[in-house]
Image (spheres, rainbow, N blue to C red):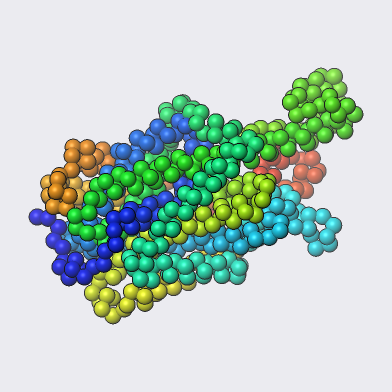
Amino acid sequence: MPFEVPQSPKESRPSWDNPMQFVLACVSYAVGLGNVWRFPYLCQMHGGGGFMIPYLIMLFVEGIPLFYMELAIGQKMRLGSIGAWSAISPYLGGLGIASVVTSLYLCLYYNVINAWSFWYLFHSFQAVLPWSDCPVNSNRTAYLEECEVATPTQYFFFRETLNISSSIDENGGVHMGLALCLLLAWLIVYLFIVKGVKSTGKVVYFTATFPYVVLIIYLIRGVTLHGALNGVKYMFTPKMEQLANPQTWINAATQIFFSLGLGFGSLIAFASYNHHNNNFENQAITVSLINSGTSIFASIVTFSIYGFKATFNYESCLERMRLLLMNTFELAEDTVHIDNISFWITDLNRTQPEQIAAIASRIETCSLEAVEGTGLAFIVYSEAIKNMPAAQLWSVLYFFMLLLLGMGSMLGNVTAIITPLRDFKVLAHSLSNETLNGLVCLFCLLLGFGFTTRSGNYWFTMFNEYGATFSLLFIVLLEIVTVSYIYGLKRFEKDIEDMLGRRPNWYWKIMWVAVSPLLLISLFVFYILNYIQGGAPTYQAWDKDVVREELTQIRLGLRSDSEISCVNLCAYSHIEMTVTRKSM
């Protein structure tokens, strides 16, 4: 039999003013920070344009079919995740609860990123960007050692923004500036959702569209920067050998999975406010393609900025080598230029090996390649921005865009919690929308203050790595198995026909019955095996004492040039995380 929809929620439930509001809400939720920093990072890691092939394949065999399924469930039931799955079967209420708890985990730490964006945004309104140069020491005789060993952008993020401790065991106090930014972030989220779908529907017109305006502005500026084409060329130059790497396909699948926001209950909640005959099939395809298209578009912007930064660093490195050779060997200024540095080093090494050996520790290997991870948004971009003309303007635009992307995703995350709670009659009758929404935001804010302590970034990393990945794979696997094999595909087809006037075609049925479940099971098994074989979890810690020791060793000549480069780029120490698997 089709889903049995309770009549009272269906009759009294608010709806989107028009289908465009629903589409924009889904776009605002799905298009987030991962499109700006993680997708470009994966492109870089897996051979540039070659990563597009498995990414697009996974979009059509995994992303769109599962997106379609969640929208269909939400629109038919017109209930949040708990109510929807309980109506399918009383035994499946726990599946909805799992989605709510996972969304709660995400809300606790995701808004901290918005707090960081506020922090950077406020610091952008200065004559000189504070991450442009290292601060001087208390004697005003030199720069701070911790900053000199790293870079000004790294120092500003880890010390000024996070005031990070040396390990997860050193808690320290709350960073008041960051705590106030988190308070502001949650206050804005509350104002966005205070009236439920009615206020959210108005907000998404801005949160879903303005980031594209900023990306277009950045694209125009990015491609005109010196060296930008080096980055774009790298992105679109495929390394086809990466297609033989299983990790490439796994990362493509997980990127699609998490980028679309499957399993959190947000899509079910959004779709529950649709009218019964809304064409969710076209909307599922549209939103999925917009999301993936945004990732590719944002990567072009990112790689143009990345190319500018890499070229700037490369040419600065060559200029330092040019001055070193001229001063050491008293060469004429017009004989040494950045295009023949390698020739001069090779020639001088042959003719004057003793002098070359004397300056060997100061000779750098200049390269256009610079591997970066998820620090792309706050470290790499800020380093590139500081070298642009009118840096303050570009900084404000960039971090305001990050803020809107984060806020748009938060609307979906909080809605995934509030909608199922509102479906409980006790809460619906005893608390107004404003009160319930405020209590949820206040609860998340109070717990979120833990991420603003000195060790908060380590807890942030734990939540980000372990809080949702495993549970989401399990949730979505149960969802598709339940719909296809327990509830029954024939019944599900009838429900879709009831809403759209037609049954889904063979493509959707093959994906739901065979391809998507097998893919999810493969990802699930791989995740478990990878976790078991990975040994004790580790995390990277910013330890200023270790950095100072490394600095002393460098000055004594006890480190090779490659090791010095590692210290200058990273300034990290690797610490084993003493967290048992049971507690995770």
Is 149 on the left-hand or right-hand side of 426? right
Residue 208 visible within the image: yes
Q: Dividing the picture into quarters, in which one does residue 519 lie?
A: top left
**Residue pictured at 73% horizontal, 37% vertical:** 316
Of 449 and 223, the residue lying toward us:
223
176 up-or-down from 576: above or below: below
Is 475 on the left-hand or right-hand side of 142? left
Q: Position of residue 83 (x, y in %)?
A: 23, 64
**Residue pictured at 34% horizontal, 40% vertical:** 59
**Residue pictured at 18% horizontal, 37% vertical:** 506
Residue 478 visible within the image: no
499 up-or-down from 455: above or below: above
| Furthest residue in direction left, as rendered | 1
Q: Position of residue 267 (x, y in %)?
A: 31, 55
435 up-or-down from 389: above or below: below
**Residue pictured at 52% horizontal, 67% vertical:** 182
Quarter of the figure that contains the C terminus: bottom left
Is 375 on the left-hand or right-hand side of 326? left
Of 574 and 233, the residue lying toward us:
233
| Furthest residue in direction right, as rendered | 330
Q: Position of residue 223 (x, y in %)?
A: 58, 38
Q: Position of residue 313 (x, y in %)?
A: 68, 39
Quarter of the figure that contains the N terminus: bottom left
- How many numbered discs sit on the rendered protein? 0
